[in-house]
Image (cartoon, rainbow, N blue to C red):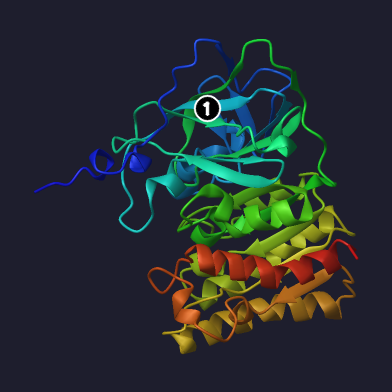
Amino acid sequence: MKLDISKIDANFLAGSKIDKEDIVWISILEEPISLHGLAVHEPGKFWRLPEKLIDQVNSGVTQLARHTAGGRIRFRTDSPYIAYRAKPLNSGYMSHMPLTGSVGTDIFINGESCTTFRPPHDSAEWYEGIVNIPDDRPDMHGMKDVELNMGLYNGITEGYIGLKAGAALEAPKPYDIDLPIVYYGNSVTQGGCASKPGNSFPAFLGRWLNADHINLGFSGSGRGEENMAEYIAALPMSLFFMDYDHNAPNAEHLWKTHYRFYKIIREAQPDLPIVIATMPNEDLRPAQRAERFTAIRATYDRALAEGDKHVWFVDGRTLFGDEDRDACTMDGAHPNDFGFYRMAKNLLPCLKEALNIR
């Protein structure tokens, strides 16, 4: 027998019913709403890579670059409620990741997580949700900062913000670190398998540092191609985080591509902080990890030998900590929320040092 839990507990309904007669819907493409983390944002296209590159890497990147991992919608308003409506790009379930993380959108008001707008079971259908500001939260009355984190493993073709008619709508406050941190890597970087978009490790770090960021994690497809390195090298950024260990088919591939990828970035931006990391997991395959680790560590050692004073190395084995490491993933490879939180906490000191934040 199939159980519909929402008929027993209404808190599990896919979305909140929006019955506001005074609501006004505004396209997320309209100013002063600000979109972050996306290279393309135009009608029907909310992509992480520009059109000229999206078909020039590998087929996995071609598909995944249309996902909105790291995409954020930001604005300020005094509306007593905030609603969201979106049309997902694709349908489809992931057996190990909830729709709230792959397709859903979560909302932060004044930096506080309020809810996740949850898609229906048919994840290709329009979905919507609403947050009503409680009367007993005066800190959320008046003008407030709003940020929505977009789905990690799907895209959208349309999106709208719903506000009370007559409410003020202003551009967001600037980030403390306005030039984005750029993350390049694999499924872990993209956010698999966080329960909501704001729980990926780049999202945690973005909030804690109050930094803009661009998520160029491509599940199974971040393989260190030179044209990807050349694209990244031309981006204005405050820091580059390089982690495609998982997606290299073997250590030999890392020996062939890893240093060259780093060098393309370094030659374009001589003073840019670059953080080089190895994978945090794979505890069950220590021999394979050791081979990959050696190849990646060689890039860092060579950079130091060449006089690079703006490069950092992170041993991924430290990111889950020493206790309960097996509780940090859902399948031995992809972090759950606990794993992402530990990763972000253990990366934070390194990023602060690289960014010269005291």
Of 344 and 109, nearer the camera is 109
What is the x, y in percent for residue 248?
51, 67
What is the x, y in percent for residue 128?
44, 28
Residue 235 sits in quarter: top right
Image: 264 above or below 259: above
Q: Name which residue type carries label 1.
A: Tyr
> Residue placed farthest to the left in the image?
1
Residue at image position (72%, 18%) is: 31
Residue under numbered circle 1:
84
Of 306 and 124, nearer the camera is 124
Q: Secondary structure under badge 1?
A: strand
Image: 75 above or below 351: above
What is the x, y in percent for residue 107?
58, 39
Residue at image position (74%, 38%) is: 139
Image: 337 above or below 158: below
Residue 169 sits in quarter: top right
Question: Where's the C terminus, which quadrant?
Answer: bottom right
Residue at image position (13%, 46%) is: 2
Residue at image position (72%, 64%) is: 262
Of 239 and 339, nearer the camera is 339
Badge 1 density bin: few <14, some 14–19, many ≥20, Cα 10 Å: many
Whether residue 328 sits left or right of residue 11 in the image: it is right
What is the x, y in percent for residue 207?
71, 51
